[in-house]
Image (cartoon, rainbow, N blue to C red):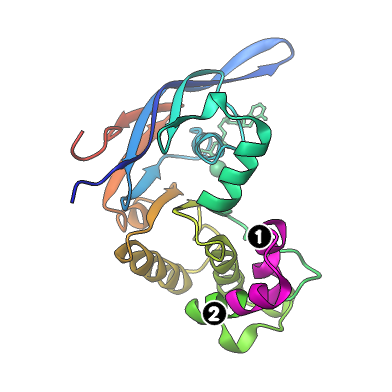
Amino acid sequence: MADEVFFSMQDIDKDYYMAGEAVHILKKITLSIEEGEYLSVLGPSGSGKSTLMNIIGCLDTPTAGRYVLRGREVDEMDEAELARLRSREIGFIFQNSQLLPRLDARKNVELPLIYAGVPPRERRRRAEAMLERVGLADRMDHLPTQLSGGQQQRVAVARALVGNPSLLLADEPTGALDQKTGAQIMELFRELNDEHRTIIMITHDMHIAAHAHRIVRIIDGEILEGGEARDA
Ligand code: ADP
Ligand code: MG
C-alpha cells in the first residue's frame, strides 16, 4: 500500500514586520510528510519551530510559498474551510497544555466537540473514552490545578485526539514535564503512530526527537536536512 502525501510545503517564507522592517523568520522551508509518518522537527529556541507549527496547522499564513494539505492549496481556502479543516483534521498540543482552569478534565476534553456541534451525551461518551485511553479514568472530575503536570498534558493529548484528527501536531509536548512523565507521553505517541496516526512533534531536545521515525532539523528559520518525505 503506497502511503499518500499528507501535506507538502515548498519555499515557505514567513516574515514579521517590526517597526516597519521585515524580519525573516522562516526561509524557503520545503517539507513534506506522508500519512502515517511520525516526524520530529528539531531545533533550538528561537529557530522558528512554533512559527512553522502555526503554518502547518493553518493557524497562521505564510508570507510566500506553496502549501498543499491533503491535495488542496491552503492559500485558496476561505476562513470557514480553514476552521473546518483545523477542527476535523488537526489535533493541537501546546507546550503548557493550555487547559481551561475552570473546567474539569472531562469538560476540557469535550471542548473541541462542542465547537464541532456534537450532542452532549455523545460528547461525554467520547471524552470519557479518550481520558481512559490516556490513563485518566479516575481523574475525569478533577480541575487542572488538581492534576500533576504530566496528567494535565495527558488531558491535553486527549483533547487533541477526541475529534479523531488525522494529524497530531505537538509543540514541545514534554517541555514542561519531568523525564518519567515525558517518557509516558512518548509511549502514548508511539502507540498512536502504531495506529497509523500522522504525528509531527516539535522539540529542542534531541533525545525526545529520537522517538520519531524521521527528524528534520531547523536552525535560524531554515531546514537543514530531512525535508523530503522518505520515498520522495
Ligand atoms: P521557536 O518555537 O523555535 O522557539 P518561534 O517560532 O517561536 O521559535 O520564533 C522564531 C523567531 O520569530 C524568534 O526570533 C521570535 O522572536 C520571532 N517571532 C515569533 N513570533 C513573532 C511575532 N509575532 N512578531 C515578531 N517576531 C516574532
Ligand atoms: Mg516554540
Residue 18 versus residue 110 in the image, above or below: above
> Which amino acid, by three-letter code, is at mark 2?
Ala
Name the secondary structure under disc 1.
helix
Q: Is residue 108 magenta?
A: yes
Looking at the image, tell me whether mark 1 or mark 2 is earlier in sequence order: 1
Q: Is residue 10 magenta?
A: no
> Which amino acid, by three-letter code, is at mark 1?
Pro
Nearest the viewer among 131 and 39 is: 131
Which label number is shown at residue 129? 2
Please, what is the dominant secondary structure of the magenta stretch? helix
Which label number is shown at residue 91? none
Residue 97: give x, y in percent of width and height: 62, 60
Callout 1 touching callout 2 (CB < 8 Å): no
Task: Tell me if mark 1 has few (under 14), some (14-19) or many (20+) residues whose alpha carbon lies within 10 angstroms of its own.
Answer: many
Residue 117: give x, y in percent of width and height: 70, 60
Mark 1–mark 2 Cα distance, whole angstroms, equals 15 Å
Residue designated by label 1:
112
Residue at point 35%, 32% (across, down): 31
Residue span colored magenta: 106-126
Nearest the viewer among 39 and 19 is: 39
In the rendered image, the residue lying farthest to the bottom is 138
Residue 158 versus residue 198 in the image, above or below: below
